[in-house]
Amino acid sequence: MPKLSPTMEEGQISSWVKEEGDAIEANETIAEVDTDKATMEMTSLEAGTLLKIIVPAGENAKLGQTIGIIGEKGEDFSALLKEIESEGSSNGAGAAKEKEAETAQEKPAETPAAVRETAPARSATSNGRLLVSPIAARMATENGIDLRSVSGSGPNGRIIKRDIEAILEGKTEVPSAAPAFAQTADIGGASAYREENTSPMRRTIAQRLTTSIGPVPTFYLTVEIEMDRAMEFRRQINESIAPEKVSLNDIIVKVAAIASLKHPFVNSSYRDDKIRFYEDADVGVAVAIDEGLITPVVRKANKKGIAEISREVRELAERARAKKLQPEEYTGATFSISNLGMFGIKEFTAIINPPEAAIFAVGAAKPTPVVKDGEIVVRNLMSVTMSCDHRVIDGATGAKFLQTFKQMLENPVLMLM
């Protein structure tokens, strides 16, 4: 089972696109897998024949678990099947069984390769196929080892248990797999960033707050915003782009993106000895689906028009509900927005999605009596609560951001300045 999303720990085989005995081309889809966030296509790294389906549709498999066997048509895979069965039994049968399973893996290279988590690895191959024992694959998965740079000591360069043990004991150096939440160019379209070393004072603040409050020391700031001008602004936009429409939330996404770049710490993340500042605002927009919550990302929202943001949010939300989003479409946000106003919620707090430093909880805009110039008038007030990672955002920093955010929503023309 390959890792098809950054937060995936196991997957359920939704369906096998190929059946036993079917020919397979390299990079051809062979199965659909339900991950924690979406339904993903699983492709084969090699051409051959699907000789055996180990995990049938509807069943779960953990990362690195063997789910099928690919080889040459008519090839005898009985030895590999016994090896896989031995590996499964060794999980609860002690060291003797583990050793027996490993010994069984010392076999000729002609034995077909198993489909496993190490799908990206290509360093030890036979006819384009990865040569790695199931136990070695599982150990590599559990310890975050990138098999692409591992030299196998088994027959024909096969990566086996002792190769992984040598790495874990420090006898061999090998690059580790990329961190699950690494926001680099590997995430398609993600914002470029710069990093600065944290100051001793900032590091001390982070350590003390983490000890006191938890892994992400969070505080909350709430502001009320008059939305009358923003609502009129929306009406004017909708008149000009009819039959298309934008929502208030689309305007909020745009304003938050612009305001965050005026207050860089809001558009950053804490990285132990560094603070990462992002060049653009990649805004996560929370979407409710049957299984929970997913946050599609509007890349470079600061550079997009409100109508473009609106179209993108709608399209991402539709595919999120259909579980068709790709990992790069829901990971790597620089901050997020959760809006429950459409459900009549006046005010709430949202939980930060690490490594983001902030999330904005948006309530409903409701007609409310307020005092203006000594008179009681009715204004549409909206409550916004900002959850802040105190390791990078101080109270004054968050307050200044909300001040800018409020000013822009109350007077949208400021977005042009």
Image (cartoon, grey):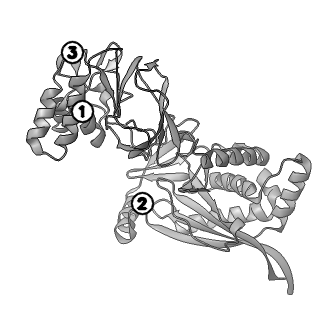
The reply to whether discs 1 and 2 touch (Cβ–Cβ < 8 Å) is: no
Q: Splitting the image into 4 quarters, where does residue 372 fall?
A: bottom right
Q: Residue at x 44, y 20 (%)?
A: 22
Q: Residue at x 31, y 38 (%)?
A: 65
Q: Which residue is mark 1?
A: 84
Q: Secondary structure at mark 3?
A: helix
**Residue 229 location (% of width, % of height):** 84, 64
Three-letter amino acid code at disc 1? Ile
Q: State how far apart marks 3 and 1 are (Cα).
A: 20 Å
Q: Left or right of 134: which side holds 63?
A: right
Decide: few, some or many residues near mark 1? Use Cα within 10 Å; few <14, some 14-19, many ≥20: many
Q: Which mark is residue 156?
A: 3
Three-letter amino acid code at disc 3? Asn
**Residue 123 location (% of width, % of height):** 31, 21
Q: Splitting the image into 4 quarters, where does residue 305 fall?
A: top right
Q: Earlier in the sequence, mark 3 or mark 1?
A: 1
Decide: few, some or many residues near mark 3? Use Cα within 10 Å; few <14, some 14-19, many ≥20: some
Q: Which residue is mark 2?
A: 202
* Front residue of 386 and 177: 177
Q: Secondary structure at mark 2?
A: helix
Judged by depth in the image, the label closer to the viewer, 1 or 2, is 1
Three-letter amino acid code at disc 2? Arg
Q: Earlier in the sequence, mark 1 or mark 2?
A: 1
**Residue 245 location (% of width, % of height):** 83, 51
